Image (spheres, grey):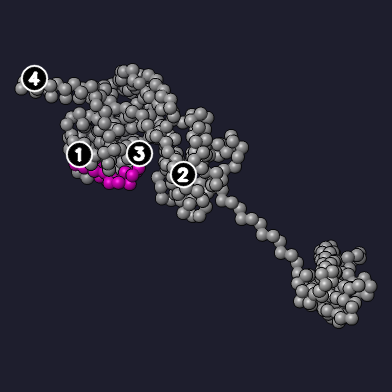
């Protein structure tokens, strides 16, 4: 029967020396020397019949003890594997070569851990951080909101999200969650869809998203009507006296900011960013905060000019969009802008309608809509108005157009009056 014994290459050395194995076939064949790859200080080795690293002794350092225990375990492993391999070969009618025996004692490589599957939620956060350097703050904020919805959807379903699960069925399930649980309207879902598809396209380019089902995801965008003031309502807002109220200063300031938007067509973000250097004689010239496009607004005869002078002098100061939305409602209420106005929302197949006094629905964006509507009513061409508002195509501009009752009556009177005269 074959035997295995362990020996030191230089048993009298004063420094660590190599450990080798004598493998004796016991069949008349010569012994085979196999180095284990380990070394030990001869003073820590028990030779003779024991042939093991010393692991006991009061003066033995704990770290050395642990290393020697591991060495002995490894030697036992090699001995068992050599003898088992030898017996298997003999049972098969062959004798292993010295090289085959040496390969047997090599430690088994640990199996490679499977590569972690890409995870959409961390990837979406990384995507958001990358876009924070190049995109508008509102876009970055929207990506964060999308991440929050996906995270809550994952919690509700109890199923971790993975790219392989982003099928058409997932989109049906996720939109059902957005409608029924998150209570989002169609317009909000359509915006999330746009951001979601851009993210998945980016993930696909990076080799992390294997599916293209997202290209078939659809959601109908139904923008609600955007409110505009009539000329009579705008005049009422301009002239209502708020000076006797305890919060007159904030109301006057909010009204001035709103009127600048209504006179120039600027978005509130652009009004808040206005500086004296933007006024070039009879023009306002600036870069849009939202689109980064160039805006040129004519000022000749524009009622915004005295308000701009107050803005440059610091008598009017920018406030947050949320505060303006709250304050301008107060001013509109005082101005008697309280016509019952329907507000329609679409959520999937459901259409909901509520009626409010008009002042409750007025916001900072109403100023821009009022500018477009009254400019059209006054006879300006839509091409001229688009030039000042920065709209690039008529499709996006069209939703700002509201036919006021005054314009409707005037147009019909002009056309049908001419017909009657003829």
Instruction: State if disc 2 and disc 1 touch (CB < 8 Å).
Output: no
User: Could you say which quadrant of the image residue 231 lies in?
Assistant: top left
Instruction: Compute the Cα span from label 3 to label 2.
Output: 33 Å
Considering the image in quadrants, where does the C terminus appear? top left
Judge left or right: residue 125 versus residue 35: left
Q: Is residue 219 above or below residue 29?
A: above
Q: Earlier in the sequence, mark 1 or mark 2?
A: 2
Q: Earlier in the sequence, mark 1 or mark 3?
A: 3
Residue positioned most to the front: 93
Q: Is residue 366 above or below residue 46?
A: above
Q: Secondary structure at mark 3?
A: helix
Out of 173 and 42, give the one closest to the viewer: 173
Crowding near pointer 3: few (<14 within 10 Å), some, many (20+)? some
Label disc, if present, on residue 384 of the rendered structure: 1
Judge left or right: residue 30 versus residue 114: right
The mark lying in front, picked from 4 and 1, is 4
Instruction: State if disc 3 and disc 1 touch (CB < 8 Å).
Output: no
Crowding near pointer 2: few (<14 within 10 Å), some, many (20+)? some
Crowding near pointer 1: few (<14 within 10 Å), some, many (20+)? few
Q: Is residue 79 above or below residue 261?
A: below
Per the rendered image, the range of residues in magenta is 282-298
Say if the magenta span includes residue 287. Answer: yes
Considering the image in quadrants, where does the N terminus appear? bottom right
Instruction: Compute the Cα span from label 1 to label 3.
Output: 22 Å
Say if the magenta span includes residue 370. Answer: no
Instruction: Compute the Cα span from label 1 to label 2.
Output: 39 Å
Q: Secondary structure at mark 2?
A: helix
Q: Earlier in the sequence, mark 4 or mark 3?
A: 3
Q: Mark 2 = which residue?
A: 214
Q: Mark 3 = which residue?
A: 269
Q: Secondary structure at mark 1?
A: helix
Q: Mark 4 = which residue?
A: 420
């Amino acid at each position: 029967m074959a035997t295995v014994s362990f020996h030191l290459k230089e048993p009298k050395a004063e420094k660590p020396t190599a450990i080798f194995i004598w493998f004796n076939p016991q069949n008349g064949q010569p012994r085979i020397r196999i180095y284990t790859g380990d070394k030990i200080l001869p003073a820590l080795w028990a030779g003779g019949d024991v042939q093991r690293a010393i692991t006991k002794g009061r003066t033995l350092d704990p770290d050395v003890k642990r290393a020697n225990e591991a060495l002995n375990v490894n030697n036992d492993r090699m001995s068992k594997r050599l003898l088992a391999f030898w017996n298997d070969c003999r049972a098969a009618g062959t004798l292993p070569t010295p090289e085959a025996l040496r390969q047997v004692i090599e430690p088994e490589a640990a199996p490679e851990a499977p590569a972690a599957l890409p995870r959409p939620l961390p990837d979406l956060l990384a995507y958001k951080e990358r876009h924070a350097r190049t995109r508008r703050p509102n876009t970055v904020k929207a990506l964060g909101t999308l991440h929050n919805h996906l995270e809550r959807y994952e919690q509700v379903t109890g199923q971790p999200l993975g790219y392989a699960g982003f099928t058409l069925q997932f989109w049906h399930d996720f939109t059902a969650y957005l409608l029924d649980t998150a209570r989002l309207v169609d317009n909000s879902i359509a915006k999330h869809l746009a951001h979601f598809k851009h993210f998945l396209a980016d993930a696909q380019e990076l080799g992390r998203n294997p599916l293209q089902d997202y290209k078939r995801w659809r959601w109908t965008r139904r923008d609600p009507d955007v409110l505009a003031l009539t000329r009579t309502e705008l005049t009422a807002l301009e002239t209502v006296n708020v000076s006797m109220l305890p919060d007159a200063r904030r109301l006057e300031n909010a009204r001035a900011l709103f009127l600048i938007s209504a006179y120039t067509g600027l978005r509130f973000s652009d009004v808040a960013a206005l500086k004296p250097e933007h006024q070039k004689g009879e023009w306002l010239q600036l870069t849009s905060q939202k689109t980064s496009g160039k805006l040129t607004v004519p000022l000749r005869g524009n009622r915004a000019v005295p308000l701009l002078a107050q803005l440059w002098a610091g008598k009017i100061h920018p406030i947050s969009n949320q505060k303006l939305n709250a304050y301008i409602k107060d001013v509109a209420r005082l101005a008697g802008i309280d016509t019952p106005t329907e507000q329609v929302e679409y959520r999937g197949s459901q259409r909901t309608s509520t009626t409010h006094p008009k002042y409750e629905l007025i916001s900072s964006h109403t100023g821009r809509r009022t500018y477009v509507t009254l400019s059209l009513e006054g006879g300006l061409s839509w091409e001229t108005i688009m030039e000042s508002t920065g709209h690039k195509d008529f499709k996006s501009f069209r939703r700002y157009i509201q036919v006021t009752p005054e314009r409707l009556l005037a147009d019909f009177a002009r056309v049908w009056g001419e017909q009657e005269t003829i």
